[in-house]
Image (cartoon, rainbow, N blue to C red):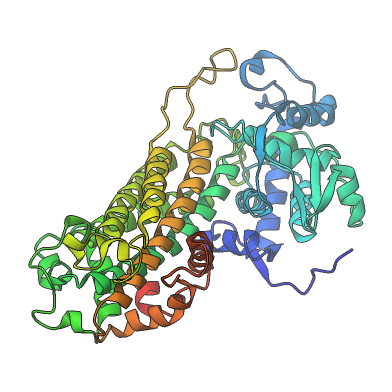
Amino acid sequence: MADYSDSPSVLLVPGQTAISDIERIALAKHRVLLSPQAQVHIASGHTCLLRHIAAGTTIYGVSTGLGANVDIVRQPNTAHAQQNDVLWARASGTGPAATDTQVRAMVAVRLARLALGRSGISPAVAMALVDMLNNHITPVVPLVGALSEGDLAPMAHIASLLTGKGHASVAGRGRVSGVEAFAQVGLSLPVLGPKDGLALISSNSASIGLACLNLGSIHRLMRAHIAAFTLSCEGFCANLSPFQPQSVHLRPAAGQAKASRALLGLLDGGILHQEKSARRLQDPISFRSAASIAGAALESLQQAQRAVDLELSSSDDNPAVVAETDNIIPNGNFDPTHVAVVVDGLHLALARVAAATGERVIKMMSPSVSGLPRFLAEAEGDGTGFAPVQKTVAALVAEIVHDATPLSPMVLPVAERVEDYASLLFPALCRGQRLIARMYELTAIEIMVAARAIALRPPVRLGCGSQALMDRLAPLCPRLPLEQPVADNIVLLTQAIEHPDFLGDFSILADDT
């Protein structure tokens, strides 16, 4: 059994978990610790639940069935079997499996919310989730089947492991059952209490886990996007007038000042800041309005972050156990429509960024617009240059726009039409992950093309930030005539800008995006 006891850890304090904490648990595989406050809250909630069961209180999912079966009465002495059935029946997902990183994010979010003490979960079952993360037991979770009115299917695939069922890998090795996974790391399976099955799955934590990963990735993407646009400005000899403070202040659209400030900071010290250095009085809109377009995405990103922060710091349990007032409250707080709406807006904003990026890439290859050789080919070469890359750019933009299109809020009613609405946040986030991947590839291509445009211009003094970017990225860009397939360079550049530490030392970008 591997020893992870010396790994860095994240302490889960009720109401204080951040998106970055979920990223550290999921991406960096940090250990998880429940704070003393979290342990007290969980224990108090469980005690409150048991007290109400003993008093004969009717409790949804404990003394009744679920969904349309709410009219079926359950006896408390059959709670263990009932809670197992809650999980097994709902482990009904299909499609591709989530990555280990995605599953860790889902489990981490559920733990952060269990720490609030509103679920009534047994302390031992909550600790079993901690043990899963800290021993790198990763359930197999299909990504199709959640409508995001509580992510029942993905959360049930996770929770089934605690009953010995389901499938999992241990430290990335093979696929075993839940009982085998726990045995491999020397752990015993917990016994589910009277509300544990429902507490484990009645939550949108799978969606919020994916959202944390997506938002962190988009934050880094926007930094890379501004860096790429900076190089495009250098290669195009762009007019910087639209990004100057006096221009931005005339119409201070959300995020525009941030994007402009970052751009001008990277270009500081270069010739573009000098009067009459631009080739044109007015550049194409994809250049001239780039800060406004990026600013809209930055503002949408902040709105999505605020919505996810709210979810991480509050309970979506139904029914909720409120120990301090000795209440058990049925509710609809598992609905994350407020998150779905801003996530849809963020995806649409990124599609606009993609459209402008694609235009810039193609215009830099057009001699009538850029003043450079067609397709950025060598003056005495065969003229092909980056011409085929234009088709790749067109395909990427088309896919991004498709994945950014919001899903219809109309879904088939289920559970005897009791469940007659769904936010569809989970499938929207899955589409968002594809969109983000394509955006990184498109950004890598802009860097590649911009670097070539800079190389073809007469030597000039670049901005200090631009030069640093060129020093870092130019070795990953292809030279003409080509020495290897361009696809290899796109992969290298994409991997570079996706890395969490990429541009981390560019304080201008880190502060403003």
Identified at 78% across, 38% down, the residue is 160
Q: Residue at x 74, y 56 (%)?
A: 133
Left or right for 3, reference 414: right
Percent from the top left, x then y, of residue 497?
Answer: 48, 67
Q: Position of residue 496 (x, y in %)?
A: 51, 69
- Would residue 513 be visible to someone looking at this image? no
Residue beneath the point at 69% across and 52% down:
100
Q: How many marks?
A: 0
Image x and y of residue 489, in percent? 50, 66
Quarter of the image with the N terminus is bottom right
Residue at image x 33%, y 66%? 377
Res 469 → quadrant: bottom left
Where 302 sits versus 157, above or below?
below
Question: Considering depth in this image, is 483 or 311 the residue closer to the camera?
Answer: 483
Location of residue 179 in the rendering, given as x and y in whole percent from the top left corner:
89, 44
- In this rendering, position of residue 295 left or right of residue 494: left
Q: Is residue 157 above or below residue 57?
A: below
Vertical placement of residue 230 versus 50, above or below: below
Q: Quadrant of the C terminus?
A: bottom left
Considering depth in this image, is 45 or 428 the residue closer to the camera?
A: 428
Q: Is residue 105 visible?
A: yes
